[in-house]
Image: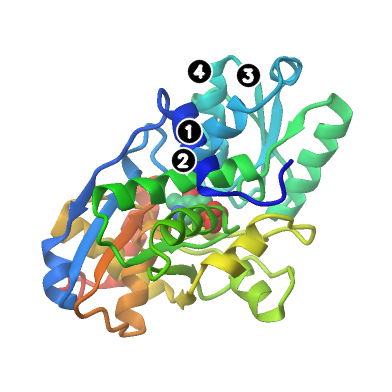
């Protein structure tokens, strides 16, 4: 394996994923442009067939397997969106996919995994427990282990989202995306900053359990506690033996912010009210960060990655309650 990913890997990924993953629209947001005094576009990766951007990296990772490995199959650990995307890709490419998840994963996501064709293994109370189980199955059954974020093919696949943004609006100078294991921000950062080194790439996590932000502060990967959040797709550690996504996030992400639950709820409600988009919490954290931290974006050209829409009615209702009846939409 080469030592470093380049834009070329992202172009190669785009060719490999083209038949299964969508080139998603970049839609101007009138309400946020007016509110923040800048130009804002929404990159609608919630419109991928599995409801989240993770299909990009999943298809690229499976396409890169040798034929012998394709027959034995793959295993992963996932809060839901990666597992679902990998299962979907596996079904279309004829590759068996096992998904290990923790008991924290919401029911709607477990159901979606099974419907997508995954062999679901529920193990332990944390993602780290689920990951231990995935590694065990890797060794016992000779499966290829595919990390949802710490894998060069996955990162290159996610990078196609950033490549599309820069092609769709070349003058974009600021990109916000949710930050968990860092595969998305690493891939987008590589694409966006190779094309425009002046662009700002900003990652956003929830207040508690922000594993990548904690690791960046410490200067090395650290373990964090897991706490339930409206942005459940951003939970989980980055792996103490992280080899790709930590270093690339360090290199390509300009700033990281944390947001609290009430702000995530308000941002979700804003997208519903003003854009008629139903999204999961992880997809709304960019908006929440600008609001909570009063980030000055005047004059900038901003892309917000709307990373997924896999939210249950129960969780969406919870966000509505938290946002409050009179305070739900920004004007
Ligand atoms: C996985 C995920 C993220 C974060 O991606 P990482 O590569 O883990 O940083 C953001 N939003 C959604 C909807 C996700 O599923």
Q: Residues within 10 Å of mark 4 (few under 14, many from 20)?
A: few
Does any portion of residue 80 appear in the rendered image?
Answer: no
In the picture, residue 219 is in which quadrant? bottom right
* Residue pointed to by mark 4: 92
In the picture, residue 210 is in which quadrant? bottom right
Tag 2 near tag 1, CB within 8 Å = yes
Q: What residue lies at 28% left-to-right and 62% top-to-bottom?
A: 172
Q: Residues within 10 Å of mark 2 (few under 14, many from 20)?
A: some
Where does residue 146 sit, x and y in percent of width and height? 68, 38
* Residue pointed to by mark 2: 108
SS class of the residue under badge 2?
helix
Q: Quadrant of the N terminus?
A: top right
Q: Nearer the viewer, mark 4 or mark 1?
A: 4
Of the numbered discs 4 and 1, the one sitting upstream in the chain is: 4
SS class of the residue under badge 1?
helix
Q: CA distance from mark 3 to mark 2?
A: 24 Å
Q: What residue lies at 24% left-to-right and 73% top-to-bottom?
A: 300
Q: Residues within 10 Å of mark 1 (few under 14, many from 20)?
A: some
Q: Is residue 160 above or below residue 177?
A: above
Of the numbered discs 2 and 4, the one sitting upstream in the chain is: 4
Q: CA distance from mark 2 to mark 1?
A: 6 Å
Of the numbered discs 3 and 2, the one sitting upstream in the chain is: 3
Q: What residue lies at 75% left-to-right and 18% top-to-bottom?
A: 72
Where does residue 88 sit, x and y in percent of width and height? 50, 26
Where does residue 49 sit, x and y in percent of width and height? 37, 31
Q: Is mark 2 within 8 Å of ligand 1?
A: no
Q: Is mark 3 within 8 Å of ligand 1?
A: no
* Residue pointed to by mark 1: 112
Q: Residues within 10 Å of mark 3 (few under 14, many from 20)?
A: many
* Residue pointed to by mark 3: 95
Of residues 196 and 318, the one drawn nearer to the viewer in this rendering:
196
Q: Quadrant of the C terminus?
A: bottom left
């Amino acid at each position: 394996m080469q030592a470093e990913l380049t834009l070329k890997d992202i172009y190669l990924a785009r060719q490999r994923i083209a038949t299964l993953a969508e080139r998603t629209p970049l839609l101007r947001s009138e309400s946020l442009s007016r509110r923040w005094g800048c130009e804002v576009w929404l990159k609608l990766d919630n419109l991928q067939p599995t409801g989240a951007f993770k299909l990009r990296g999943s298809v690229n990772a499976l396409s890169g397997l040798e034929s012998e490995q394709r027959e034995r199959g793959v295993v992963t650990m996932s809060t839901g969106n990666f597992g679902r995307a990998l299962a979907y890709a596996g079904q279309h490419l004829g590759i068996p996919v096992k998904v290990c998840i923790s008991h924290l994963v919401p029911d709607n996501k477990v159901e979606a995994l099974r419907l997508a064709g995954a062999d679901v293994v529920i193990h332990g109370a944390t993602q780290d427990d689920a990951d231990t189980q995935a590694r065990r199955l890797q060794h016992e059954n000779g499966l290829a282990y595919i990390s949802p974020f710490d894998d060069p093919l996955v990162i290159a696949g996610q990078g196609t989202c950033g490549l599309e943004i820069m092609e769709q609006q070349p003058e974009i100078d600021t990109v916000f995306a949710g930050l968990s294991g860092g595969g998305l921000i690493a891939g987008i950062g590589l694409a966006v900053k190779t094309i425009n080194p002046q662009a700002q790439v900003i990652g956003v996590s929830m207040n508690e359990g922000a594993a990548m932000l904690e690791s960046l502060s410490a200067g090395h990967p650290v373990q964090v506690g897991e706490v339930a959040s409206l942005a459940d797709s951003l939970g989980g550690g980055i792996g103490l033996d992280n080899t790709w996504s930590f270093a690339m996030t360090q290199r390509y992400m300009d700033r990281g912010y944390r947001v609290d639950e009430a702000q995530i709820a308000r941002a979700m409600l804003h997208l519903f009210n003003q854009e008629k988009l139903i999204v999961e919490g992880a997809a709304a954290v960019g908006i929440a960060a600008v609001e909570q931290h009063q980030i000055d974006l005047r004059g900038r050209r901003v892309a917000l990655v709307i990373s997924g829409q896999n939210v249950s009615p129960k969780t969406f209702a919870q966000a509505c309650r938290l946002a409050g009846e009179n305070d739900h939409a920004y004007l």
